[in-house]
Amino acid sequence: MSTQLRNVPNCRAQNELTQTRFWGGADRMTCLQVTQVKPKSERTTSGSADFFNHLSLTRHQARRLAVELMLFAEEREVEEVEEFNADGTLIGDGEGILGDNGVMIQIRG
């Protein structure tokens, strides 16, 4: 069973974002699907499967993505930089942080 939630405010017409809450099963539990009408230039067929873009998220994923989206909206997004020296220092002019996974990230702003 799914429940339509309110549309994302101030996104109208081709920019409309709809939200649907649904049960993702015992492993995912309650999830959210965000749906957008795909721009005509991105459609490859005339079928309904190619008419929409959608993103399905668990609550955990939605929480993590919300943080990243706020950083982007505030022009403070974090860029992933994979070029670094053997000693973990960033190649280039910027300062970065070496994560546990070995990927260097750089923070703007």
Image (cartoon, rainbow, N blue to C red):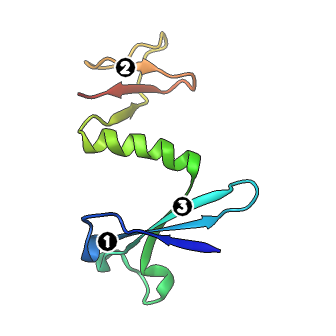
Q: Amino acid at mark 1?
A: Glu
Mark 3 to mark 1: distance in Å?
16 Å
Foreground label between 1 and 2: 1
Q: Is residue 18 left or right of residue 58?
A: left
Pick the front one: 83 or 31: 31
How far across and how far down the image is residue 50, in percent?
46, 80
Q: Which residue is mark 1?
A: 16
Q: Amino acid at mark 2?
A: Gly
Please tell me how crowded label 2 is: few (under 14), some (14-19), or many (20+) other residues with Cα within 10 Å.
Answer: many
- Tell me the residue at 54%/23% (across/down): 102
Q: Amino acid at mark 3?
A: Leu
Which quadrant holds residue 79?
A: top left
How far across and how far down the image is residue 86, in percent?
49, 13
Please tell me how crowded label 1 is: few (under 14), some (14-19), or many (20+) other residues with Cα within 10 Å.
Answer: some
- Tell me the residue at 39%/41% (across/down): 68
- Tell me the residue at 43%/15% (across/down): 85
How far across and how far down the image is residue 59, in percent?
57, 50
Q: Which residue is mark 3?
A: 32
